[in-house]
Image (cartoon, rainbow, N blue to C red):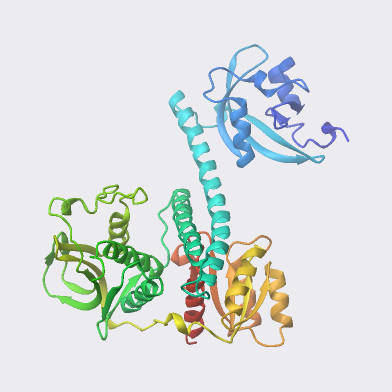
Amino acid sequence: MKADAVFPFEQAAWPALLVDAEGAICHCNAAAVAAFGDLCQQASNVSSLWSPENSYTAADVLAQAELAAALLPLRLVTRNSSPTAYLASLCPVPFQGRKLFLLQLLPREAAPEPKNQAAETSTWQKQRLDCALQLARTVSLDFNNALTSILGHASHILSKIEPEHPWRPSLLEIEKSAARAADISNDLGAFSRQEKESRAQTSGNLNSVLQHCLEFFQKNPGPESISWSLRLEHSPYAARFDELKMQQVFIRIVENSVQALPPGQGRIILSTRNLELSQATQDRAVSLAPGAYVCAEVSDNGYGIKEDVMPRIFEPFFTTKRDKKHRGLGLPWVYGIVTNHGGGVAVSSEPGQGTSVRIYLPAEKRTAKHNGIPIGELSGSETILMVDDEDFLLTMGQTILSGHGYRVLTANSGPKALDLLHRSESSVDLLLADLVMPAMSGRELIEQAERVSPSIRVLCTSGYVWPAHQLNERPYLQKPFTAQELLLKVKQTLMVQE
């Protein structure tokens, strides 16, 4: 079939061309022939139309169109050899089994014209940044899926083998490396989001966070014995926070304390207390307005912080540690997370006398619900339907959940999941659904599943970071996650009352 028999822009009033990935012209409409004459011949290259006044090459533009449709200003040489300004639209189109690109050229008089060459360059740079952001989002999502499988399997095996097992050190290194890669992936994801999105901040109990932190370190003890003490407020105020981020905050603080302890006689105290301030109060550099707060404190009897170092502890990339893996981002990261929650971080220390780090979060004067679940009580017997378009993640989830007593059904698409819901001999207690899937999204699946089974509990998961308002307060598990994080979130979701 001839191209001119199917080319829909043949009679368009503006020039339109079909080109291949190398820029070879496959077809031009009548307006293009009228504008460019002999330069617009089949088998010619679009670069022959290119004006040297453009700040980017034809190859640059085609590479951009491989990632996403482009709309940008161009100057092309017409049949009278004069450069003419166009607003160019370039997008990929399938044609007779080939991947071609449709180039449409609108005279610049028909569109707002940038005032100068700098404006044209700025437009092109924005187009390239948009493509980079989209690419970063895609890479981050795929990377998180792979890391979820690695972290899940590694942490699952670590929870099963004996402390003296010869493979345990290697598994710990795998888990640490995967966790480091997860940090990189999250940074890439943060770069890809032009708006500052945040995970859902729900009303929580800081006692539970400190309990989980203590369990983590007791389960993964350091080289030296440490005396741990947990002193928790009996009825702590409720504070709004991102639970997983706050867990990471205290893990980083405690890691610093562990590294500062004297050999064989280290002591760490984790505590919480309620505060009700009737007037403005100052704690080191933290200014607290009147109101209710919950304070969580980590104290140690370590070497302490030198007086000349104290003013720089929140300074990015500043570190007194000689190990190259320490980049000086621990406390600055803690400071950023806490202040983004509307709270403050106060640090007091005396050389040789230890260090105390206090986290203040605004709170409501009501007792927080206790949602802490001991790590040893994460098993269950309920039926879970896990849905993800990545089969290796389904294998990982089934291995972990079934190993803790759950009956697990898996589906790699929304339609298959709905079919399982209809055919399942027993009721499904929990739907664990990835939000980003082809054909049927996780949200569409959830809506239809709740019509089929109104009492079903739902746990969402994704490699993207979703704004709270888009989740409708549903439980959410961010990829990548460990086996313990999966089990904990599943147990918490199943415990929620109707």
Q: Quadrant of residue 247?
A: bottom left
The residue drawn where x is 48% and y is 37% is 126
| Horizontal relation, residue 393 to residue 333: left or right | right
Residue 163: x and y in percent read 46, 73
In this view, 126 is above or below 172: above
Q: Quadrant of residue 435?
A: bottom right
In this view, 385 is above or below 195: below
Residue 375: x and y in percent read 44, 80
The residue drawn where x is 62% and y is 26% is 58
Nearer to us in this view, 249 or 190: 249
In this view, 42 is above or below 111: above
Q: Is residue 116 visible?
A: no
Nearer to us in this view, 452 or 333: 333
Q: Is residue 142 visible?
A: yes
Residue 334: x and y in percent read 30, 60
Q: Quadrant of residue 79?
A: top right
Nearer to us in this view, 428 or 165: 165
